[in-house]
Amino acid sequence: MNPFHYHQGDLYCEDLSLATIARHYDTPCYVYSGAALRERYHSFSNALGDGTQVCYAVKANSNLAVLRLFAEMGAGFDIVSGGELERVLRAGGAAEKIIFSGVGKSADEIRAALSAGIACLNVESAAELWRIADIAADMGLRAPIALRVNPDVDPGTHAYIATGLKESKFGIPMDAARTLYLEAAKHPALELKGIACHIGSQLLNLAPLGEAVTRVRALYADLSAQGLTLEHLDLGGGVGIRYHDENPPSPADYAEVLNQALQGLAVKRAVELGRALVGNAGVLLTRVEYLKDNGSKQFCVVDAAMNDLLRPALYGAWHDILPLRQDAAAGQVMDVVGPICESGDFIAKDRPVRAEAGQLLAIMGAGAYGFAMSSNYNTRPRPPEVLVHGHQHRLIRRRENWDDLMGMELP
Ligand code: LLP
């Protein structure tokens, strides 16, 4: 399902023209399709079946309305900070479906997670394991934990978002994990729940994931043979999406890879999907401010910038750019850039765009790691976020104002 489509020459989100939204909320503005969010969640949870808890990776898009929508569908949540824990609880997410990942959990974050009663803390080092054990003992609780192992496979994705190679900061090497499980099993304040792994993001080829899951299975079997029976395997997230002309795996392809690697093993599973659930459900609307000709290079200066959408600047990521009016001016090769004072502030390089001053454009595939990675750099208020349902729109975060930007400062 593509919620973004042209209808009589106008780009729509579901049954609403994006130009209407731009008029109502001004630009830049994030727009999400509720139907697309639901459809993606159901496709994955149906393909994966009853034995798998789909956890939404909150970092991809943490707006409370988005979290509430996932909570209502029965999703679990993968969080990486105390702030994300607070968000999920405020949005009505069930604590017993929360998994806490991340290499640097603070003592306060661990305490908050334990008192909320979350499902599992995914532990990323021996030092963190013993800190959790001490805190749980202090609180008179048993901490539910999994070790996040590093399976040492190359996910074949951008270096900044590859996490399962042994030189990355994430996870515990397999052999060290084996020993640590046996030590942890003796600690009265630790409750060993499962094994976790996550090899990277925007995976287009799932073979490395299949390999990682096979390694996790071998560890599970080893531990079982030593009398340590775990309840679940958390296989991470990372399923890629189409930004341009990629051929990402379907939910069925994904389920097939996991099923093959885990054939015949009766153990509960969890996955931590972010981008695949929200990425193509959102766009960033922007307006062309100026066209600029530098002789050798043409620029299309828009009102959205790297503070609103960082992915092109940080990863050289591609986002399609579509005109809101299909029959707009003829295409010309340009750099689409924002107003920020950095040469790295671009949305697209050397792109044939059909644009003229004042025209509205949609930056596609902006539902994941878009608003979530935005900032106030250059003292720019962050854009509003709008959720569409059919022909209705609802503001789910207002545009920031000067007080939001400066009110915390003490001149
Ligand atoms: N689980 C863990 C432990 C993770 O570190 C991540 C993402 C996920 C799940 C969700 O991955 P997803 O299904 O969304 O690929 N800012 C980058 C992506 C960073 C991903 C970080 N970890 C981007 O814009 O491409």
Image (cartoon, rainbow, N blue to C red):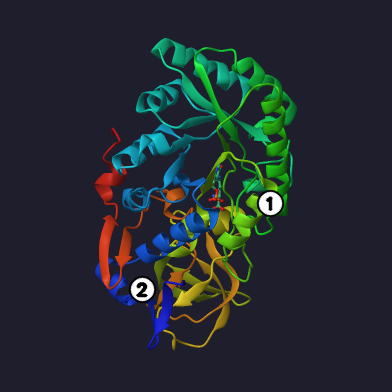
Give residue 260's mark: 1
Which residue corresponds to the image point at 56% horizontal and 21% vertical from the top-left?
128
Q: Determine the image quadrant of residue 213.
A: top right
Q: Are marks 1 and 2 in contact (CB under 8 Å)?
A: no
Instruction: Identify the residue under disc 2.
Output: 14
Judged left or right of residue 60, residue 23 is left
| Label 1, ligand 1: CB separation under 8 Å | no
Q: Is residue 306 left or right of residue 349?
A: left
Residue drawn at point x = 50 percent, y = 72 percent: 321
Q: Is residue 11 above or below residue 410?
A: below
Q: Is residue 289 visible?
A: no
Front residue of this view, candidates 394 and 407: 394
Q: Is 52 on the left-hand or right-hand side of 263? A: left
Looking at the picture, which amino acid does disc 2 mark?
Glu
Q: Residues within 10 Å of mark 2 (few under 14, many from 20)?
A: many
Mark 1, Cα crowd under 10 Å, few <14 / some 14-19 / many 20+, is few
Give the vertical position of 247 relative to 64 (above or below): below
Q: Residue at x 57, y 66 (%)?
A: 242
Residue 372 on image: x %, y %: 43, 49
Residue nearest the observer in this picture, 213 or 363: 213
Circle count: 2
Q: Give how far across and how far down residue 376 sits, in percent.
A: 40, 48
- Residue 339 place in picture, x, y as percent: 45, 61
Q: Amino acid at mark 1?
A: Gln
- The tag earlier along the polypeptide, 1 or 2, is 2
CA gap, disc 1 and disc 2:
36 Å
Along the line of sight, the residue nearer the viewer: 383 or 297: 383
